Structures are given as structure tokens and as C-alpha cells.
Image: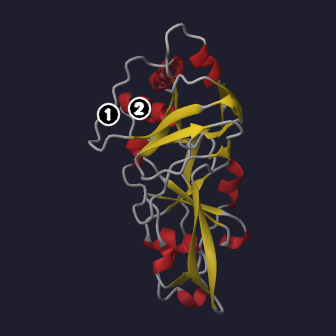
Amino acid sequence: MLDSQISGKGAFFKPHKDTPHSGSMFGSLVIVFPTKHEGGALILRHGGSEWTFDSATMVRTPVDPSAAYIAFYSDVEHEVTPVTSGYRVTLTYNLYFSTNNAAPVIPVLSTTEIAFRRTLSALLSDKTFMEEGGFLGFGLRHEYPLVPKAGLGNLINCLKGSDAIIQRVCSQLSLLTQLRVIYADNEADKSPSFIMVDDIIDYSERGWIETSIGFQMTLYDGGRRVAITGSVADKAAKYVPEPEHLEYFPRSDFEVNNIVDVDWVTDLTGFTTAKTSYTAYGNGARTHYVSIKI
């Protein structure tokens, strides 16, 4: 998709994030033509940091006419300050990942990727490190579009920035890398119960289910209880039915004691979240919601 814009005096854009047009869109490329103008600086914000792209100065300074350009991820908040004189002429392209699933070629590795690979490789060479195996968890640092009914789809091949670095380095070091969805069931025993599943589950089309969605996930959908923090692991609910119900279900189906201990290298951020409504059944049918983090 291509968008052209001619902005005269007083024109500006308020802070916003670009709307992805598909699950493979990851960013935007803005080209600023060498027309004389003042103001119209592009300000970008992400992760508590801020950058200013002053195109007016860039296109005015060179001896030979030169266009200015900048590329940024879709989840980076940005705004354009008011143009004070002249005209700011731009072309904006949407950027998409290739659909052939080929790994991108990185011509020059960043210092961050080199340092991460060196550190992780040293840990894996240490025989005392996670002697019995386990899970390393990395909360994603970027937002990603969740396409309705498509689930996670090809998202693991569309990671951005530090998320992509983590996935790439772990794969290079022969570690199995997978995306997982963390559901927070706030109806479980009056405290959140966190369930890890392979993909997004749409409970809105399933009629009614048990009041606790954690029961549904662990018993029917292959979910596994996951410890987000030590305190959550201690408080994780164990679903045990009422005695009169035991004749219908084996007790082992309800006592889910195998909480997955995840060593979180980076905390869950909740940048990519969604809520799913479902019809819960207790004394009467009612609507509940379950939230997810990736």
C-alpha cells in the first residue's frame, strides 16, 4: 500500500500507531522529498524512549538534493509536529514480511545480538545450568496483530526487533523455540490462574462452558498451568470437583498439579493482548471474559 501526502503550513498528525492491514505487516517506510519546509518533524516513541526525525533540516543541508527516509515498526507511536512554512511532501509505504517463510538475511549483526548469543552460549555450556532441563520464557517486546480466526498462524516468522533476535539466536543454538499464549482466568478460586496453550482459543462459539475457563483449558484443550511468578505458582488453583461429581470424572482429570515452571528471562509485558467473551454456567448463564498475553 502506498500513501502520498502534501502537508502545508499548520498541518500535523497527532500521536498514533499505524493499523496493520494484515498479519504479515510489520512497519512503515516514509520518504520525504527535498521540498523546502520548516517544522513537520516526526517524533517516535517506544519502550519509554523518544526519537526525533527532523526531515526539514535533513533535506535542506545537503549540497545536492537528497530525499530523507525513515522506517519504523507499526507499534511505534509517532506524531508529526506542525509544518510552520513551505510544504512537506511524503510517500509512505507499508512494509510486509515475505510469505515464502525464508529466513531473512542479516548482513551485519547488531551488538545486542552478538552479546545475547555469547551469553546464552556460555550458559548452555555450563553443566550446572538447568541440569534437568526446563523452559526459558521471554515476554514479547513488540505488539503484533491478532487476525480473527487465524490464531498465531505464521507469527513466529514475523517477529520484530529484540523478539526476532531471541528467536533467531535460540534456533541457532539448537533450542526449540515456540510461541505460546498465556490465558489469565480471573474467575479461578478468586485469584488469577495462568494457563499456557498452543494457540488462541475462541470460546465465544462454544455455547456454555464451566464457570472457570481454566477447568475447560486444562481438561479439554491441552492447556498447562504456568507459573508467571513464584507467588503465582504458590497460589495456582487445583481444580477438584465436588464429591458427588467424582463418579462422572476420574479424580486425576481434575487434580492438575504439574504446574509448568518457566524461568522468565524477560517478563510478560502484555503488549499483545486480547479479550474473549464466553458464556459461563453456574447458577445461571452469564457472560465472562478471559484475557490473553503473548
Res 252 seen here: no
Residue 214 visible in the shown view: yes
Determine the residue positioned at 36% across, 28% down: 172
The type of residue carrying mark 2 is Arg
The quadrant where residue 50 appears: top right
The mark nearer the N terminus, 1 or 2, is 1
Q: Is residue 129 rendered to the left or right of residue 8?
A: left
Give me the residue at 71% from left, 36% from top: 82
Q: Is residue 264 left or right of residue 84?
A: left
Q: Residue sitting at 52 percent across and 34 percent down?
A: 90
Element class at badge 2:
helix
- Image quarter of residue 184: bottom right
Residue 240 is situated, as x and y percent measured from the top left of the image, at 59, 76
Q: How far apart are marks 1 and 2 (CA)?
A: 9 Å
Mark 1 closeness class: few <14, some 14–19, many ≥20 residues within 10 Å:
few
Q: Residues within 10 Å of mark 2 (few under 14, many from 20)?
A: some
**In front of the other: 37 or 169:** 37
Label 2 sits on residue: 168
Whether residue 61 is situated above or below residue 84 in the rendered picture: above
Location of mark 1 (residue): 103
Residue 80's x, y, as percent?
A: 66, 37
